[in-house]
Image: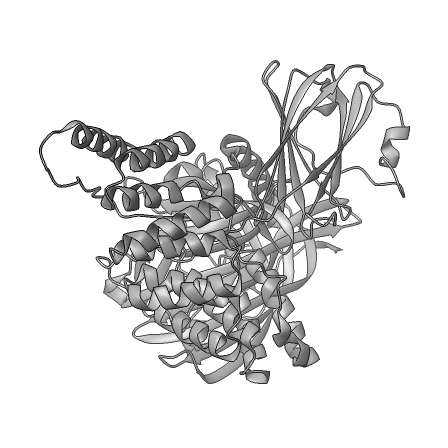
Amino acid sequence: MAVVTMLCLGFTAGAEGQSAAGSPPSAPGGIPSVLDSLHQGAALEVSVLTENKARLDRQAVARLHCDYPLRTVYQTTGNDSGTVFLGLLVGKYDVEISAVGYLSAHKEIEVTGFADNLKLEVVLQRDPTAVNFDASGTADALMPAKASKETRHAVRAFKAGNFNEAQKHLESAYKLVPSNSRVNFLLGYGLFQQKRFEQAEAYLERSTALDPHNEQALALLGRLDLLRGQFDQAAVALERAVDANPDDWLSHSFLGDVYLKQKKYEKAQEHAQLALDKGKADASSSQLTLGQAEANLGHIPEAIKALQAFLQATPASPSAAQVRTFISDLEQHASSTTAAAVPALSIPASSGAPDPVLDASQPKLSVAWQPPGVDEAKPTVAADVPCPYQKVVEGVGEHVQQLADNVGRFAAIEDLLHERLDSLGNVTSRETRKFDYAANISQPKPGFLDIDEYRTERYGPVDLPDGIATSGFYGLALIFHPSMRDNYEITCEGLGEWRGQATWVMHFRQREDRPSRIGTFKVGNDWYPFKLKGRVWITADTLQIVRLESELSSPIREILSLAQHSIAEYGPVHFEKKNVDLWLPKNAEIYLELRRRRYYRRHSFDHYMLFSVDSEEKVHEAKHDLHGPGSITPRKRKRWHA
C-alpha cells in the first residue's frame, strides 16, 4: 500500500472529514467520472506508479492535510492505483508518496483557480533494503502449477505482514518442490523475520546451494551471519552476493561492516565507498563505516569528512553524540605533536536497515507449535510515514461502540474445529462441532461492558472437546471501546497492509496499573483474570478492524496456562432488510497451552442474522455461573438474515 501526504493552504468543507467510501469511481481513460458532476473548488488526480510505469499492486492511502484551517482527510486508491481530491482551494501543495517496499517521493503542485483539474503522476523507486518478492529467478520455470500458486499466496501474505499464513503456504509448496531455490529462500526469509535464525540459516544455505546466483538469498544469509557474529561466514556469503549483483549497494554496505569487524580496514574502506557510489543518499549510513575505516588507516582528514557527512545525512541517529565526540578526538589527534594512538569509536558499525536483535534475558516459550509472539515478528510498515494516532483511535472507537450497541441483535452459525497437538505441533486428535450462536452485550453502568454469548444447544465443559469452552472473539475488539481503551497502552506502529488493503497497525498492552476486564479463565469454581497484549490491523480509509491478534502478556502459573494466542478476522456483513452494516467476526484461531497440553481451535461464523427482543425478554440464564457456553431461547424473536 502507499500513503499520500499532502500539506495545503486550504480546501473547502466538501473535502473535510473521513472518507468512508474510498475513492470516487473511475471513468475509462481519464479523470474519474465524479469530476463531471458539480463540486466546489479544484480537483487533483493522483496516480501512483512503479519504476516501469505500472500501477502499484497494492492499495494506496491518501492523506490530505491543511494547517490552517486545521483539517485532515484520508482516501484510498482503487484498482487503478489512483485517487482524486475534490474541493481544493487556491494554494501550494506538497505531496509525499510512501509505500511499503518503496522509497518515499515528494512532489509540489499549485492550484491557481477553482476550476483547475490537475493530474499528478508519481513514480516510486523500490526500497533496496526490501526483499523483491517479484524476482522469482530461473527456479520457477519448472515449478508445478500448485506449488506456484502456493508461493504466490505466500508472497501476498508476506506483503500483508502475515508470516504465519505465508509459512503455511510455503510449507505446502515445499512438499511439492523441496529443491526449489525460491521456495527455500522465502522460507528462510520468513523465519529470519520471526527471529528463528538457526532454521532460517538452514533454508538460506540450501537456497544458495540450489542456485549459487540467488543474490537475495546470498545477501540475506550474509546479513544473518553478520547478526550472529559469524564474520568469516558472513564475508563469504556477501562476497558471493556482490559477485552475483555488483550494483547491490546494500550488500557492499554490509560487507564493509563485516571487514570492519575483522579489522580488514582497506577492504572495509573499499566496500563502504562502493556502497556510497552505488547507493548515493540511500547509503548514507555507510559514511560511518567509511569514517572508521579511514581513521584506522591513519587517514584523519578523510575520516572526519566521512563522519561529518554521516551526521549531516542522519542528524537524528542514536549514534550522533558518540560520532561527534569521535570527531573531536580525531581533531585533537590531528593537532597533537605526540605519537598518540588513533582514538577508537566505541559504537558498532551499522548499515542499511536495522536488523532485529534477540533479547536473551527474557524467557522464551516454545514457538514450534504456535505463531510467533506479537513482539517477536513485527509486520512490515512503510518507512517514515506519520501515523494519525488520535484520528485512528477515535475512529475505530466509534465503530467498536456501534458494534457494542448493535451486537445484542447478532446471531450466526458457528463451526468449531478442535485439534490436540504434540510438542512439535503435530495433530494427534481432531473433533468438529456446529452451533447456533448468539451474543448480547450490555452496559450495566458507565465504563463497564457485560458480555454474554450463547449456543442453542447446551454444552457444559464435559460435552466440549477436552472439556474446554472458548468464546469472546467479537469481544476482543472492545479493547478499543471508549470505555475500555484507557486500560491499555496503545501505540501506532505505522502504515501496513492486510490482504492488499492499506491498514494502520496498532499495538496494545494491558496497563499494569489498571484492572483487567477483558476476560477470565474459569477452572472449577475459580476465576483467573488474564491480561493481554496484541496487535490490530485497522483499515486506513474506513477505520474498521479487519484483524486482531492477541496473547497473554504473562503466563498464568496457577493453572499452568503458558500460552493463549488468538487471531480473529473481521469483515462487513450487510443486512439488507434493516439496511445496516456490522463488522463481525468471520473466523478465529486459538493456540492454547493449558495444563502442559497444547491445542488448536478454529471458529468460523456464517449465515448471520439480526434478531431483536424486548428488553425484559433478554435471556439471563447464562450469566456468571455459566460452566460452558449456554443456550438462548427468547419467547419472541424477529430475525433479519444477511
Residue 73 horizontal/vertical position (percent): 65, 29
| 346, 183: nearer the viewer | 346
Does residue 161 lie above or below 461 as drawn? above
- The answer to which quarter of the image holds residue 43 is top right
Q: Decide if residue 466 is in sight here.
A: yes
Q: In this view, does 341 lie to the left or right of 378?
A: left
| 501, 339: nearer the viewer | 339
Q: Is residue 112 left or right of residue 57?
A: right
Residue 416 horizontal/vertical position (percent): 55, 72
Residue 276 horizontal/vertical position (percent): 45, 44
Does residue 272 lie above or below 114 as drawn? below
Residue displayed at 43% across by 60% down: 193
- The answer to which quarter of the image holds residue 529 is bottom left
Quadrant including the C terminus: bottom right
Residue displayed at 74% across by 47% down: 53
Q: How many numbered circles does the render carry?
A: 0
Residue 544 horizontal/vertical position (percent): 60, 44
Q: Decide if residue 357 is in sight here.
A: no
- The answer to which quarter of the image holds residue 221 is bottom left
Q: In this view, does 391 lie to the left or right of 322?
A: right
| 182, 593: nearer the viewer | 182
**Rendered image coloring scheme:** one colour
| 431, 91: nearer the viewer | 91
Does residue 332 lie above or below 279 as drawn? above
Does residue 164 lie above or below 616 as drawn? below
